[in-house]
């Protein structure tokens, strides 16, 4: 009889343990989902604010945005201490559907400098192919990317070049010549779960 009671107690403890473990796992899963949603909301807010600033400073950018298949906005922090590096987060959005893909960016370079700067980069994509290539294959800005971004002066681009228009915003406003060379963009696996 005592053996039966011991088995019943052990079984009950095991069931409670499994239940507690499952509840903890669910709570952890919920916490991670809440954290992911908060990070997404922060990126979305940054993108909305960057677009509002861009449209206020450039009517041409608003016209291109209205024609674009989609867009991407990134918040970047670049630090230079002899070697420069930086990183940030962003979102790529299909204009017609609002479908979002959260992304990351990273940059590295060599040169003399000391300090840091924070800025946003806005990409406008003319067509689905250009947008999809950026989102699905990533993109690495080379030296020619600086020529694409803002070549028409502080007003920015007047049209798409190779299917994309690029604008860089700083705390001083829209940059006339943007240097995004050495920057790589890719999907953010954690925020897209």
Image (spheres, grey):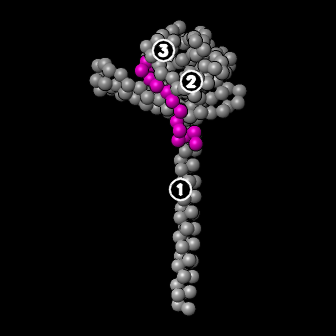
Element type where label 1 sits in the image = helix
Tell me the chief SS of the magenta region: loop
Foreground residue, 11 or 160? 11
- In space, the residues marked 3 and 2 are separated at their CA atoms by 14 Å
- In space, the residues marked 3 and 1 are separated at their CA atoms by 42 Å
Crowding around mark 3 (Cα neighbors within 10 Å: few <14, some 14 to 19, many 20+) is: some
Q: Is residue 98 left or right of residue 44?
A: right
Membership of 110 in magenta stretch: no
Q: Which comes before the other along the chain, label 3 or label 2?
A: 2
Q: Which comes before the other along the chain, label 3 or label 1?
A: 1
Q: Quadrant of residue 85?
A: top left
Q: The N terminus is located in which quarter?
A: bottom right
Give above or below for 15 relative to 58.
Answer: below
User: Which residue is painted at 53% across and 64% down in the image?
Assistant: 21
Foreground residue, 134 or 123? 134
Kindly tell me whether residue 172 is visible in this rendering. Answer: no
Q: The C terminus is located in which quarter?
A: top right
User: Which residue is painted at 68% across and 17% down in the image?
Assistant: 67
User: Which residue is painted at 41% across and 26% down in the image?
Assistant: 107
Please state the horizontal and vertical placement of residue 57, each as a whole percent of the image.
56, 18
Q: Dot 3 corresponds to which residue?
A: 145
Q: Residue furthest right?
A: 96
Membership of 183 in magenta stretch: yes
Please state the horizontal and vertical placement of residue 118, each as a whole percent of the image.
43, 27
Please state the horizontal and vertical placement of residue 125, each as a whole percent of the image.
61, 19
Element type where label 3 sits in the image = helix
As drawn, the label of residue 134 is 2
Element type where label 2 sits in the image = helix
What's drawn in magenta, residue-wise? 180-193
Crowding around mark 2 (Cα neighbors within 10 Å: few <14, some 14 to 19, many 20+) is: some
Q: Quadrant of residue 37?
A: top right
As drawn, the label of residue 28 is 1
């Amino acid at each position: 009889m005592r053996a039966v009671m011991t088995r019943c107690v052990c079984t009950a403890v095991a069931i409670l343990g499994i239940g507690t473990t499952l509840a903890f796992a669910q709570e952890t899963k919920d916490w991670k989902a809440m954290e992911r949603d908060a990070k997404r909301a922060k990126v979305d807010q940054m993108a909305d604010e960057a677009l509002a600033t861009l449209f206020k400073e450039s009517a041409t950018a608003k016209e291109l945005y209205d024609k674009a298949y989609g867009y991407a906005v990134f918040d970047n922090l670049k630090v230079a201490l002899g070697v420069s590096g930086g990183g940030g987060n962003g979102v790529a959005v299909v204009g017609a559907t609002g479908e979002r893909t959260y992304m990351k960016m990273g940059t590295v370079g060599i040169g003399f400098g000391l300090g840091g700067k924070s800025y946003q980069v806005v990409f406008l994509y003319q067509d689905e192919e250009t947008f999809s290539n950026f989102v699905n294959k990533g993109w690495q800005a080379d030296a020619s990317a600086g020529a694409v971004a803002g070549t028409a002066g502080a007003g920015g681009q007047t049209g798409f070049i190779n299917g994309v228009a690029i604008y860089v915003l700083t705390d001083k406003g829209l940059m006339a010549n943007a240097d995004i060379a050495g920057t790589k963009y890719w999907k953010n696996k954690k925020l897209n779960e």
